[in-house]
Amino acid sequence: MQQKLNQLEQQALAELEQVTSQENLQAWKVKYLGRSAKLADITKNLKDVPREERPQVGRRANEVKQALEGSYQKRLENLQDAAMIQNLEKDRLDVTLPGRPVQPGRLHPTTRTHREIYAIWAEMGFQMYRSREVESDDYNFTYMNMPPHHPARDMWDTFYTKQEGVILRTHTSPGQMRVMRERAPEPIRVIVPGMCYRYEQISARSEIQFNQIEGLAVGEKITFSDLKGTLNSFARRFFHQGVRTRFRANHFPFTEPSAEMDVECFVCGGEGCSVCKGTGWLEILGCGMVHPTVLKYGGYDPEKYSGFAFGMGPERITMLKYRIPDIRYFWANDLRFLQQF
Ligand code: FA5
């Protein structure tokens, strides 16, 4: 029996030498260490061995089992190492290859315009106030002197939400009301930048989502001259020192009187061209003196306080500045467009 065990051990180890794959190794394991392997048979049938031989046979069988298990484990590790090395070789990286050039990002043209505009208003003493994009109907319209059912509301095509009285702001003007209600009766000088939403036909000049920068100054003895002087000063700093401007009478429900401000067309210098549609002028913002009703809603006594407000569209100003013919480029995420700035 001892001899049988020795032979078995030799045969198993010799075969193990020949094993070169993990599948073959598993087959080897079943054959020599499995439940129906010869070694297992010997252990199971130990009772048939003469009594006096039994302890030696048992011990030897155990030794053989341990030897085979140890060799199996070593072989398995060898094969796994070999497989790993083979994989590493296959996926070898050529670290000497030059890398792909990193494309540095750049600021979106509207962001650049925003930053220039913020800097100018900051220099003129205007603070930044962030208002909300999801607004109540009251702030967007009623407190801005447009009661429910007032036809002036039609000037703004509105996105309504499922919640009664909650809309996406159509302009940054409700921000005026929020600042006034927070600060009254303190004097105010703020700009309110942010996204606005209108249910409009998208075209080369109009998007359904666009930015506005609102401005508001409230205090004692603020006049229309202050409005004109401040906005002229802004235009000179933003465009160039000699830029000509003009104010045209207009109507906004929340300002009285109201106006629109044009700057002279910088493409043709006022001669008339396709950009200014032959007029020589380009509109850049709406403005006016804050309506007494709005002041009252904001908590200011219109007998004592007055103010001016304006709202400009940074995308339109960017279009003018860089002569961009279509507003839809701003949201198209086309690198050929964005890389030009
Ligand atoms: C207003 O929204 C007023 N709230 C502005 C205002 C504020 C007047 C304070 C008086 C006092 P208007 O609808 O004209 O006005 O929009 C102002 C600017 O927003 C426009 O001059 C334009 O530059 C920009 N704008 C308006 N609609 C769009 C649009 N669909 N796409 C891109 N820009 C737009």
Image: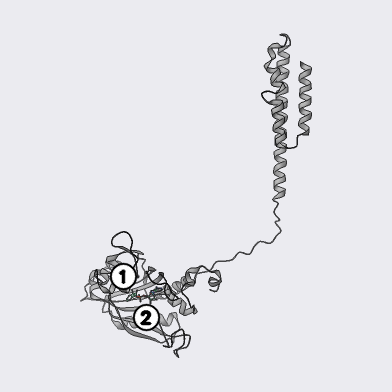
Identified by mark 1, the residue type is Gln
Residue 203 in view here: yes
Front residue (pair 191, 201): 201
Taking 316 as reference, is 11 above or below it? Answer: above
User: Mark 1 or 2 closer to N-term?
Assistant: 1
Identified by mark 2, the residue type is Leu
**In the image, what residue occupies the spot 37% across and 80% down?**
231
Residue 236 placement (x, y as % from top left): 42, 83
> In the drawing, does residue 75 fall left or right of residue 136?
right
Residue 258 placement (x, y as % from top left): 30, 80
Taking 77 as reference, is 205 above or below it? Answer: below
Whether the residue carrying mark 1 lies under 8 Å from ligand 1 is answered with yes
Quadrant position of ligand 1: bottom left
Q: Which residue is mark 1?
A: 176
Q: Which residue is mark 2?
A: 231
From this viewpoint, which residue is outermost toward the front?
201
Numbered badge on residue 273: none
Front residue (pair 228, 102): 102
Taking 258 as reference, is 131 above or below it? Answer: above
